[in-house]
Every structure is written in C-alpha cells, then in structure tokens.
Amino acid sequence: MRYRWDCGSVGILKMRENVFVLAHFASLFVALATLGAGQTATPIQNAPAQMFEGLFGPDGAGRPARLTVPSFRFTPIYSVQEAGIPVIVRSKYATYTSDALKAGIEGKVTVRAVVTQDGTVGDVEVVKSLDALHGLDDSAVNAAKQWQFEPVLKNGVPVQVRIEMIFAFVLGK
C-alpha cells in the first residue's frame, strides 16, 4: 500500500522534496509563538519589524495572531491484488499522431494510473515508453485520463487503486 500527501488546494506533496519546506515552516511557527510568549528572540525574530507587521494584534501588542497549520490527509492507494480489479465503464483508444504515422512506428505503451474513489483516472505515468519524440506516449496518457471505471470497493468503501494499462499502436496494412 502506498500513501500520498493531500494538502488542500496546494496539491500533492512529495515527502522527500518538501521536508526542507516543512521544517522551515515549523521553525517559523515556533519562532513566532515564542516571540508572542515573551521569550528570548531567535535569529529569525531579529529580522526587520516590517517582516512581522500585522502578525501581532492590531496595536502591535504582544498578543500573537492566530496561525493556521495546514492539515494533511493520507489517502491509501491499493494494488489490484489488495482491492480488486476495476470494471471499465468507458474506454478511449489512443490515436496515432501524424509524425508517428509518417515514421511508421508500431508497438506498445504501458502506463500506470490511479483509479480514484469516484472511478475517474487520476495520476498517469508512462512505465514503458514507445515513442516520446513523435507523441505516442502523450497520446496514451491522454487516452488513459479519459477512461471511466466503476468505483472499487474494499470493505464496502470506495478506494483508490493503481492499475497498468497497455496501449497498442498498430499500423493498418
């Protein structure tokens, strides 16, 4: 089972890339809280006053403003072995691009996608590329995003499931 971070309108946070940002957010929060409590100033609190203007009460008193901390929600993404295979409601073929037709490219593109709780396709990534240069990989990704599935239920609750889809590009004779 894999998890991803949802942070409201900010989108998906990847934990490895954002540890630095979250650590600095936490240190700023602690610095502002200690300043409001009348404790010794930290280096960040020695910054120019205009940086903190408006953070402490309307009259600049020692009352700290109410800071909001973003809430995080973990959404599990199950494999088909854990939750079951989603049933296709609507599918879409990937189309050839004119450049790929001229180049005579044939083969398969494999994409990995997440079927969300409502049956739509969320994140899609190319696992096995056929042709990024002439646009066949992009065509497969765009087609995958238009598929619709019945929501997968695990213990009666709709869950997200990671699937792989193979799009075959075959030239007509």
Image (tube, rainbow, N blue to C red):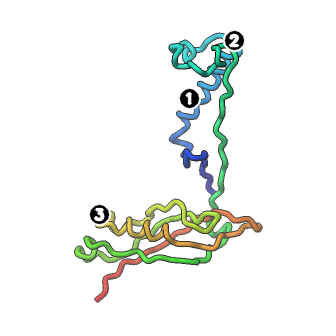
Q: Position of residue 4 (x, y in %)?
A: 60, 51
Q: Is residue 127 shown above or below 105? A: above
Reading the image, the residue beneath label 1 is 24
Quadrant holding the N terminus: bottom right
Q: Residue at x 49, y 67 (%)?
A: 145
Q: Amino acid at mark 1?
A: His
Secondary structure found at label 2:
loop
What's the CA distance linking mark 2 and mark 1? 21 Å
- Note whether 7 is above or below 139 in the view shown: above
Name the image quarter holding residue 52: top right
Mark 1 and mark 3 lie on one chain; the one further toward the N terminus is: 1
Circle nearer the N terminus (2, 3):
2
| 34 relative to 122, above or below | above
Coordinates of residue 60 in the picture (x, y in percent): 63, 14
- Circle 1 sits in a helix, a strand or a loop, which is it? helix
The disc label shown at residue 133, or none: 3
Residue at 44% across / 71% down in the picture?
143
Residue at the bottom extreme, as displayed: 173
Residue at image location 52% in from the left, 19% down from the top: 51
Q: Position of residue 148 (x, y in %)?
A: 56, 72
Q: Is residue 77 above or below residue 156?
A: above
Q: How many marks?
A: 3
| Front residue of 117 and 68 | 68
First in residue order: circle 2 vs circle 1: 1
Hey, which quadrant is residue 105 in on the image?
bottom left
Q: Are marks 2 and 1 in contact (CB under 8 Å)?
A: no
Residue at the location (59% across, 14% down)?
42
Q: Which mark is residue 38?
A: 2
Compute the Cα span from label 1 to label 3.
40 Å
Local crowd at mark 3 within 10 Å, few (<14), some, or many (≥20)?
few
Q: Is residue 82 left or right of residue 141?
A: right
Given this view, does label 2 or label 1 mark the residue nearer the observer?
2
